[in-house]
Amino acid sequence: MDHHSSLRESAGTAAPVRRTGGEGAAREGHYTERRLRTVAQAALLGGPLFLLGTVLHPERYGEGIAAAGYIYGITHDVQAFGLLLQVISLVSVYVLGAWRFGRGGVPAFFAALIGTLLWFGLIVIDGARNPVLARYAPETVHTPADLDPGVAIIVLPALLVFPVGYVLLPLLLARQGAKWTGLLLGIGAVVYTIGGLAIFALGPHSPAIQVLETTGALPYALGFVLLGWMWGHGRHEPGPLDSSNTEELRQSFPLQISRQDPDGMPHRAD
């Protein structure tokens, strides 16, 4: 009699154990989302660092680079580190919103990511190569003669993909209710790139290059600050779910937003 009673009591406790497991999975999913939002906040630092390196950029002609010494390399290191943080933030934002961005999010984020990585390569080449070149052939620095095949294979795609990526990404963000974030990123990236292209048209001595690059880097950095704050704190206002999404997309990204917890953070959809 006591044995059967014990079995019944054990069976009666089985359901709560299963419920506890489900609640634990939900908590783990919510915790994972919080961690992703924390990583997304890398943009809060990545944008300003890129702006700082741009503002402190020394002269761009050969003699000016040689006179700047190690400062030229340091400013490019700051920019490069900011770009890496931007890449980390973009990946986190995509993972957080992929189920809502839909298939249209893939080309937009892919172009922005590749463009940012290519620009990272451009900045690293510039900061490491041109101080050396400025010592031995200062007249060739930042001129068409400087574009040997090893440099051109990174620089030319960067000058194309970077602005294109930050035209596609703002269009996607605007559809998700982040119009101002997208606008700042798009305008900033395009103006900044024009400054980079102008060096070949106006020459490295032109002060217009620094004006254009700084003018573009400012809204670009502000756009990333907004991106990191909005997605890092769950304050973005997503637009309608992309109709091209399928149940497969939802299953691939289980951290779906179904409701808001009292602390304002999105909760896993169960």
Image: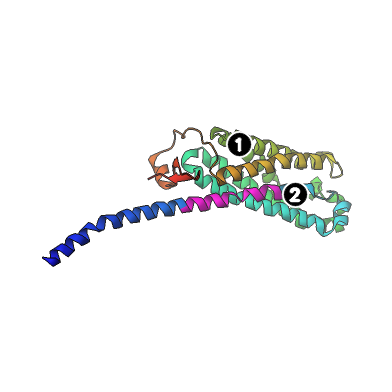
Query: Which amino acid does the dot numbered 1 rest on?
Result: Pro
Q: How many marks?
A: 2
- Vertical placement of 100 versus 21: above or below? above
Residue occupying the point 37% across, 53% down? 23
Query: Which amino acid does the dot numbered 2 rest on?
Result: Leu
Residue 113, horizontal then vertical, whole percent: 60, 46
Q: Main secondary structure of the magenta part?
A: helix
Pick the front one: 210 or 97: 97
Q: Alpha-carbon neighbours of circle 1 within 10 Å: few (<14), some, or many (≥20)?
A: many
Callout in the foreground (1, 2): 2
Residue occupying the point 40% across, 38% down? 246
Quarter holding the N terminus? bottom left
Residue 177, horizontal then vertical, whole percent: 55, 34
Q: Which residues are magenta?
A: 31-49
- Vertical placement of 165 versus 152: above or below? above
Helix, strand or loop status at disc 2: helix
Q: Would residue 228 be found to the left or right of residue 48 on screen? A: left
Q: Are marks 1 and 2 in contact (CB under 8 Å)?
A: no
Q: CA distance from mark 1 to mark 2?
A: 23 Å
Residue picked out by circle 1? 170
- Is residue 46 magenta-colored? yes
Helix, strand or loop status at disc 1: helix
Query: N-terminal of the two: label 1 or label 2?
Result: 2
Q: Would residue 211 be found to the left or right of residue 98 on screen? A: right
Q: Which mark is residue 52?
A: 2
Please indicate, yes or no, whether residue 217 appears anywhere in the rendered image. Answer: yes
Residue 267, horizontal then vertical, whole percent: 44, 45
